[in-house]
């Protein structure tokens, strides 16, 4: 607050009258206001009844909260540009004189309840902005000719008629809000009008022939019956909350936006907010997996669904998602929870298009109680036909049942996972922006079509659907990653895949992967029944068909080298957790850098990798093949997906496995124990343990046997579980494989830099020798593998045994859902 304002308040705050003019003004006021173009606030003067100001050089005047004020006279304030009258309940139009305010640009009249009319403002030749808010006695408004540009009339409960728009030749913005008795508005032929905001009570609106009108906000006009907006520049019209029966006259090029309202309900920690983020393609909804709500109040977000044919019928789909508080919050009573949900429901007075009831895993008693609670306490009985049950896994929102999936159900869906839908027989998807598609464990699925409509699809995984024996995805040019199993025929030509493994398709007979200009790796090691292969026009340089029939018909580029002869080779399978050093060890053993190394929780190895090499030691030459599988614990993959990817690598070794290297980075943690048991129980027979060697990486004293033995003893003493694992395996090998991909320090010269690299390179060479010599001394007959059917059964049984709640659905609830709801 300025010193001048403080002195003014001290002088007048308790007075009944303020009379300041050219003759009666105090000296300090006279000098100050004569010299400056400042502002003045008269606020909260409880005793003030009369204000009279004359010939002051004010630029801004705000009069507010003066409960006894009944007269205002402003004379010749020629510098005044802004005037505000707020909360002066006794002030009337007749007792308010505005004379020769020749520079006034903005006038605001707010909550002056005795204003029954707007006084003559012809004396305000430069007025551009007028705001009339909360004048409850105002009935009509007829404006005189003026240069007004912006007009706002809101919260005037008695106003029922506005005329005189023809006298406003320069008006560009009109806002009429919350005027309950105003049902008709004609603002046609205002040639300068560009922007209109309307109140929800309007029933008839004529804004035709507004040739500059570019924005009309009728989003709250739920009672609008007639609208004429012809002959203007509108390109999109927001009628999302208007009645479907509204009569609209509009230009042919106008896009009309309609909004669908989606209410999300369910238990706390069930995935409601996660689904809201997925639908809106945002992270504005707080996600939580615990029994304390992250959603303390309802949350809402609007988004558009941009279809390929969105201009069809001049309509665009718009959605509003409302995420309510979850039922079952341990800090809230049921009553409080219901009132908070009701708060979100009341946000949609125009109605609800969809109710998504989210459950996480199986349909438990708590979910049943929550369903009935919401239905019986908040809705009518016929709400069920608007309810979609969204059933998702506790780990990821996988679709479990799919009677009918329409593209408008999940408008911004990018990733779709269909798992364990035992009744699903066919799948045909509508046009969409889908990028990732997974279909697995659907025992009756026998046909997939509609790939030509998936113009943006990049990854496709179709796994463990035994009745699906043919797949044609040749129309998906954008496809870069493909995983399949159980197929007899596959056409993946004309795609953009760079790698393809068919080891999960042991019965495949026909394969067309031609015209894949990025394809560099094709693995058909387990395809003993392959009869026809077309791999022309690809980047393949080498193809191993040694386990395929001699009679196979192969179409290929002239430069392709094809291996037919089987080798006497020892297979080394490398397994472990992501970031544990698997791929680094694979590079060390093969003396290459073809395996992508990473120290993070997202695997660089998306598929298995394999490479053959020779090891010459003590006048012996052995052929080895290293297979590096994807790491367990990848933060982007489910356990099931990880196991199938490891199985793919296992089946690429039809000769059998000579050694399994289980890599741990440092000490034997709980995560390593869980990973060890996971791989052992889900993929192998019990006698695999005699082929397993534990490789302890990052052990700096790996050259000293005494230190290595000491570390093994420490492992055994750490816990009985670790001791049992160590004792059951084929021993422990210690290595240290530091990176040779180093950055040069700012303060080291070239020789020092090269010396560091040489030290690390020598450590890797020593590690290689230690591991391979150990494997030579501990050789055995190759471990014979299960076939694909048996391996697949093991994985599925393991997942069901350890994640049973994710797959079960209560039969009674399922029948209820089929009768009333769509299950996703």
Image: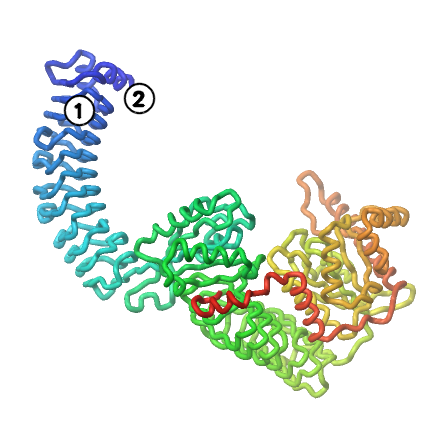
Q: Earlier in the sequence, mark 2 or mark 1?
A: 2
Label 1, residues with CA under 10 Å away: few <14, some 14-19, many ≥20: some
Labelled disc at residue 1: 2
User: Residue 654 or 588: which is nearer the viewer?
Assistant: 654
Labelled disc at residue 822: none
Left or right of 83? Residue 769 is right
Q: Position of residue 425 (x, y in %)?
A: 53, 77
Q: Position of residue 450 (x, y in %)?
A: 47, 75
Tell me what residue is drawn at x 46 percent, y 44 percent. Answer: 296
Q: Is residue 259 above or below residue 123?
A: below
Tell me what residue is drawn at x 68 percent, y 69 percent. Answer: 648
Picture quarter containing residue 539?
A: bottom right
Q: Is residue 625 above or below residue 135?
A: below
User: Residue 277 or 242: which is nearer the viewer?
Assistant: 242
Left or right of 218? Residue 457 is right
Left or right of 101? Residue 434 is right
Q: Position of residue 594 (x, y in %)?
A: 70, 62
Left or right of 292? Residue 152 is left
Labelled disc at residue 68: 1
Does residue 152 appear anywhere in the picture? no
Q: Is residue 685 above or below residue 637?
A: below
Q: Nearer the viewer, mark 2 or mark 1?
A: 1
Instruction: Report helix, strand or loop for mark 1.
Output: loop
Tell me what residue is drawn at x 17 percent, y 15 percent. Answer: 30
Instruction: Give me the C-alpha separation between circle 2 and circle 1.
Output: 24 Å
Q: Position of residue 13 (x, y in %)?
A: 23, 18
Label 2, residues with CA under 10 Å away: few <14, some 14-19, many ≥20: few
Q: Residue furthest right?
A: 618
Picture quarter containing residue 639?
A: bottom right
Quarter in which the N terminus is drawn = top left
Q: Residue furthest bottom?
A: 551
Does residue 191 appear anywhere in the picture? yes
């Amino acid at each position: 607050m300025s010193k001048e304002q403080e002195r003014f308040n001290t002088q007048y705050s308790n007075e009944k009258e303020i009379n300041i003019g050219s003759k009666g003004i105090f000296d300090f006021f006279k000098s100050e206001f004569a010299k400056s173009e400042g502002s003045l606030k008269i606020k909260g003067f409880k005793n003030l009844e009369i204000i009279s100001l004359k010939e002051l050089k004010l630029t801004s005047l705000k009069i507010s909260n003066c409960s006894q004020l009944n007269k205002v006279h402003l004379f010749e304030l020629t510098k005044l540009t802004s005037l505000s009258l707020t909360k002066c309940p006794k002030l009337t139009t007749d007792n308010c004189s505005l004379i020769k305010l020749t520079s006034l640009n903005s006038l605001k009249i707010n909550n002056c309840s005795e204003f029954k009319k707007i006084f003559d403002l012809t004396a305000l030749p430069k007025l551009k902005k007028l705001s009339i808010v909360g004048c409850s006695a105002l009935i009509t408004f007829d404006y005189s000719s003026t240069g007004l540009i912006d007009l706002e009339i809101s919260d005037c409960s008695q106003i029922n008629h506005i005329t005189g728009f023809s006298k406003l030749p320069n008006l560009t913005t009109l806002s009429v809000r919350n005027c309950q008795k105003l049902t008709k508005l004609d603002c046609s032929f205002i040639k300068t009008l560009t922007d209109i905001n309307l109140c929800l009570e309007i029933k008839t609106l004529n804004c035709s022939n507004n040739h500059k009108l570019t924005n009309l906000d009728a989003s709250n006009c739920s009672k609008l019956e007639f609208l004429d907006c012809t002959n203007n520049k509108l390109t999109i019209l927001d009628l999302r909350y208007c009645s479907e029966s509204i009569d609209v006259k509009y230009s042919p090029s106008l896009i009309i936006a309609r909004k669908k309202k989606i209410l999300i309900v369910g238990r706390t920690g069930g995935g409601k907010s996660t689904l809201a983020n997925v639908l809106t393609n945002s992270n504005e909804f707080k996600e939580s997996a615990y029994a304390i709500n992250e959603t303390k109040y309802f949350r809402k977000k609007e988004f558009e669904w941009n279809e390929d044919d969105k201009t069809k019928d001049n309509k665009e789909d718009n959605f509003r998602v409302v995420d309510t508080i979850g039922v079952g919050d341990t800090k809230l009573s049921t009553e409080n929870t219901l009132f908070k949900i009701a708060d979100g429901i009341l946000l949609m007075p125009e109605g609800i298009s969809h109710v998504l009831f989210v459950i996480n895993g199986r349909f438990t008693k708590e979910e049943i109680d929550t369903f009935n609670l919401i239905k019986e306490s908040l809705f009518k009985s016929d709400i069920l036909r608007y309810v979609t049950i969204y059933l998702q896994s506790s780990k990821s929102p996988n679709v479990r049942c799919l009677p009918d999936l329409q593209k408008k159900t999940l408008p911004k869906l990018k990733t779709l996972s269909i798992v364990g839908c035992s009744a699903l027989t066919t799948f045909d998807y509508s046009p969409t922006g889908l990028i990732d598609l997974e279909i697995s464990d659907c025992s009756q699925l026998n046909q997939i079509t509609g790939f030509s409509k998936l113009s943006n699809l990049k990854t496709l995984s179709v796994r463990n659907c035994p009745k699906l024996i043919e797949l044609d995805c040749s129309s998906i040019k954008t496809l870069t990653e493909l995983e399949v199993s159980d197929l007899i025929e596959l056409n993946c030509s004309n795609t953009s895949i760079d790698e393809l493994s068919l080891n999960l398709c042991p019965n495949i007979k026909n394969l067309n992967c031609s015209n894949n200009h990025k394809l560099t790796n094709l693995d058909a090691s387990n395809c003993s029944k392959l009869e026809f292969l077309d791999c022309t026009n690809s980047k393949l340089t080498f193809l191993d068909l040694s386990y395929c029939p001699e009679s196979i018909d192969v179409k290929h580029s002239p430069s392709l080298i094809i291996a037919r002869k089987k080798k006497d080779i020892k297979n080394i399978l490398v397994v472990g957790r992501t970031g544990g050093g698997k791929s680094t060890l694979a590079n060390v053993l093969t003396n290459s850098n073809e395996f992508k190394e990473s120290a993070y929780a997202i695997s660089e190895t998306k598929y298995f990798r394999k490479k053959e090499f020779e090891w010459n030691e003590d006048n012996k030459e052995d052929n080895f093949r290293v297979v590096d599988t994807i790491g367990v614990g990848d933060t982007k993959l489910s356990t099931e997906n990880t196991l199938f990817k490891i199985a793919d690598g296992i089946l690429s070794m039809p000769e059998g496995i000579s050694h399994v290297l289980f890599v741990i980075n440092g000490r034997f943690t709980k995560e390593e124990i869980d990973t060890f048991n996971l791989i052992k129980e889900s993929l192998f027979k019990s006698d695999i343990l005699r082929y397993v060697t534990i490789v302890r990486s990052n052990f700096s004293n790996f050259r000293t046997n005494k230190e290595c033995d000491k570390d093994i003893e420490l492992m055994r003493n750490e816990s009985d579980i670790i001791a049992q694992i160590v004792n059951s395996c084929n021993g422990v090998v210690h290595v240290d494989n530091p990176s040779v991909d180093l950055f040069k320090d700012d303060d080291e010269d070239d020789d020092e830099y090269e010396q560091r690299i040489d030290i690390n390179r020598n450590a890797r060479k020593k590690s290689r020798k230690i591991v391979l010599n150990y494997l030579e001394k501990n050789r055995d007959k190759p471990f014979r593998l299960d076939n694909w059917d048996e391996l697949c059964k093991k994985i599925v049984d393991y997942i069901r045994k350890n994640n049973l709640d994710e797959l079960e659905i209560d039969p009674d609830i399922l029948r209820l859902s089929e009768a009333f709801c769509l299950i996703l």
